[in-house]
Image: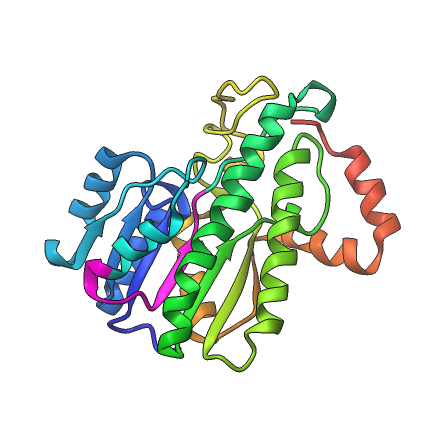
Amino acid sequence: MQINNKIVWITGASSGIGEALCYELVKYDCKLIISSRRTNELERVKEQCNTASSNVKILPLDLANLPHPEQIANKAINAFGKVDILINSGGITQRSMLKDTSLEVDRKIMDIDYFGTIALAKAILPHMLKNKSGHISAISSIVGRFGFPMRSAYSAAKHALHGFFESAQAEMKNTGVNFLIVVPGRVKTNVSVNAITGTGETYGKMDEGQEDGITAEECAKKIVKAISKNKKEVNIGSTDILLVYIHRYAPWLYRIIASRISAT
């Protein structure tokens, strides 16, 4: 898929990978629709994009509360007349043992990371099918491929995304609409700082592993490259990505490694 001059809708655009994607995509003269809960941060990202102000439209939304996703999708379409690419980057993670995690927190993470993502995908899909062209990406995680300490709800939500998007890839095979599952390992963002605990409070700390992760800019470049090549799935990270393959080909070894991983 040619990226140049495409109209791209990005959720989670106010920080982290989503923000980095904005700066990467404007290099390809893309027009952007940027979404998150924090309008003031979206305004900041818009100002920092190296493009004309008219090429970036702000569309605030809360993935935890999408009563009418079709209306939101229509607003995105009306911003520039169509949407070529939707990148679902918005989400939230967790730092808590499952025994200490309330069911409300499990539901919140599932609402944001799974239901919020598929709601927008399903809402924009008819538009793309009508155009016989389009691309929808979902930012998953390596824990969407295996369980991990302190991430039970987050891992469950990401596993669900894989099931949904792999099904979408099979069903939409000959429609002109492509789907990509992005599987990042550790990326140096504030994702752990903004994580929630078992009681729903903000974790507020940068994980040591997160601090040592690849940059959001590097991750964004690889995502854009994967979209341009119409890939179905892409693993992005450093040596942590090896766990995906260990889990697939030597699950017994993965269980040993996981049992020795610190719960933080």
Q: Which residues, given as a range, are shown in magenta?
A: 78-90
Residue found at x 85% / y 41%: 256
Give the vertical position of 110 relative to 172 (above or below).
above
Using the rendered view, name the quadrant where residue 154 is placed: top right
Q: Tell me if residue 81 is in the magenta stretch.
A: yes
Q: Is 219 displayed left or right of 4 in the figure?
A: right
Spot the residue most to the right.
252
| Residue 150, position as x, y percentages in the image | 67, 30
Give the vertical position of 93 relative to 123 (above or below).
above
Specify whether residue 222 is in view: no
Colour basis: rainbow
Using the rendered view, name the quadrant where residue 55 is placed: bottom left
Residue found at x 40% / y 79%: 132
| Residue 108, position as x, y percentages in the image | 54, 31
Residue found at x 59% / y 24%: 104
Q: In terms of depth relative to the viewer, which is nearer, 184 or 38?
A: 38
Q: In terms of depth relative to the viewer, which is nearer, 248 or 165?
A: 165
Specify whether residue 207 is in view: yes
Q: Is 213 displayed left or right of 19 in the figure?
A: right
Q: In terms of depth relative to the viewer, which is nearer, 92 or 119?
A: 119
Q: Tell me if residue 165 is in the magenta stretch.
A: no
| Residue 187, position as x, y percentages in the image | 49, 45
Q: Is 243 displayed left or right of 170 in the figure?
A: right
| Residue 250, position as x, y percentages in the image | 84, 56
